Image: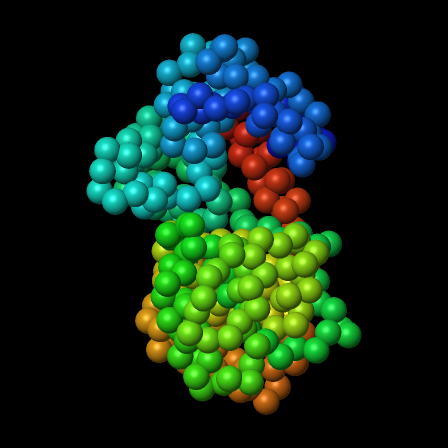
């Protein structure tokens, strides 16, 4: 929205909450943290006509589909949300949104391919970006640790498998400090630094003190591997077609999703004799990666899709 606003778009943000939360509270957060100057409203009060009306998750897709507002319907798809649930009403409701005839704009190519092939959905994609003004290599930092994105409240990040891998790794390399972030983690059978929820600045510092990082995903890949790369921390991720398609970087290390395989992949990185040179090359590979590229592609999708009568 910020990118489009800077390029002359008139944005309007509408909150849709089926649990009827406090929209004024959400608006205050939006104003405070994102700095986007636009109209904010509640879907239940109605939306004004627009060139494009964009859903951003599966519940809002129903609101966009049913609204009487004029405007071509788009669907900003950030992940394959049926995977967020066991086989259930919610998983079916989420899947059915891909049959609504909305024009998809997806985070990464894997989602666009999946939606077009399995649902016949018209879908364009944008590449993942990275804020290299926040994530960058620190030449003065001494790399010695391993970091894990351990957001346990998000099941699709396979945190339990990652912790089993770190337990194996810690037994073989007790001298290597392990850093966990993303949530407060309780007692574990190995020593670790519990960072919890951190700021981007703190995260940049953590990455710069680590040789390797572990980031797992059972759905669309997270932003974490790109951020690790930008700091020169070599990411180890679970080997999956969706991860390879979206990451598409030669410095990512892939491993089967088993504790022993993940631990072995981390060991292979920390045992490399030229890991510092690898770190510099990994960081350099991200220098041209920007969220402006993603924004420009989204802009192009709108302009192309809205041409015509």
Q: Position of residue 171 (x, y in %)?
A: 43, 84
- 87 or 289: nearer the viewer: 87
Residue at the image point whose x is 70% and y is 25% from the top: 37
Q: Quadrant of residue 98?
A: top left
Q: Is residue 96 left or right of residue 266?
A: left
Residue at the image point whose x is 48% and y is 60% from the top: 185
Q: Residue furthest front?
A: 187
Q: Is residue 231 left or right of residue 214?
A: right
Name above or below for residue 135 compared with residue 125: below
Q: How many discs appear?
A: 0
Residue 220 visible in the displayed image: no
Q: Position of residue 52 (x, y in %)?
A: 52, 22
Q: Quadrant of residue 88?
A: top left
Q: Quadrant of residue 137?
A: bottom right
Q: Position of residue 109 (x, y in %)?
A: 44, 49
Name above or below for residue 268 compared with residue 126: below
- 201 or 242: nearer the viewer: 201
Task: Assign the N terminus to one quadrant of the image.
Answer: top right
Residue 253 visible in the displayed image: yes
Q: Is residue 196 left or right of residue 66?
A: right
Q: How is the image coloured?
A: rainbow
Residue at the image point whose x is 43% and y is 69% from the top: 188
Q: Residue furthest right?
A: 140
Q: Position of residue 219 (x, y in %)?
A: 38, 52
Q: Residue furthest bottom?
A: 273
Residue at the image point whose x is 68% and y is 59% from the top: 202
Name above or below for residue 298 compared with residue 282: above
């Amino acid at each position: 929205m910020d990118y489009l606003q800077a390029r002359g778009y008139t944005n309007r943000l509408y909150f849709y909450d089926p649990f009827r939360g406090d929209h004024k509270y959400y608006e205050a957060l939006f104003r405070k943290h994102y700095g986007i100057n636009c109209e904010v409203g509640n879907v239940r009060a109605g939306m004004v006509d627009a060139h494009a009306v964009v859903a951003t998750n599966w519940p809002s897709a129903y609101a966009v589909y049913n609204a009487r507002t004029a405007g071509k319907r788009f669907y900003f798809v950030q992940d394959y949300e049926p995977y967020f649930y066991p086989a259930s009403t919610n998983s079916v409701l989420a899947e059915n949104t891909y049959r609504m005839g909305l024009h998809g704009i997806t985070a990464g190519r894997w989602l666009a391919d999946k939606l077009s092939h399995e649902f016949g959905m018209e879908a364009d994609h944008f590449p993942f970006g990275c804020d290299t003004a926040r994530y960058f290599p620190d030449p003065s930092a001494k790399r010695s640790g391993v970091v894990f994105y351990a957001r346990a409240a998000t099941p699709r990040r396979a945190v339990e498998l990652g912790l089993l891998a770190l337990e194996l790794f810690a037994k073989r390399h007790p001298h290597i400090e392990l850093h966990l972030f993303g949530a407060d983690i309780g007692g574990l059978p190995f020593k670790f630094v519990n960072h919890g929820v951190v700021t981007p600045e703190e995260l940049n510092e953590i990455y710069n003190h680590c040789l390797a990082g572990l980031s797992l995903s059972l759905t669309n890949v997270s932003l974490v591997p790109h951020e690790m790369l930008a700091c020169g921390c070599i990411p180890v991720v679970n080997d999956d077609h969706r991860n390879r398609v979206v990451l598409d970087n030669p410095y990512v290390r892939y491993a089967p999703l088993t504790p022993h395989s993940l631990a072995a992949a981390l060991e292979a990185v920390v045992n490399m004799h030229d890991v510092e040179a690898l770190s510099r090359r990994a960081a350099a590979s991200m220098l041209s990666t920007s969220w402006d590229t993603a924004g420009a592609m989204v802009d192009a999708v709108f302009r192309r899709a809205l041409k015509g009568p």
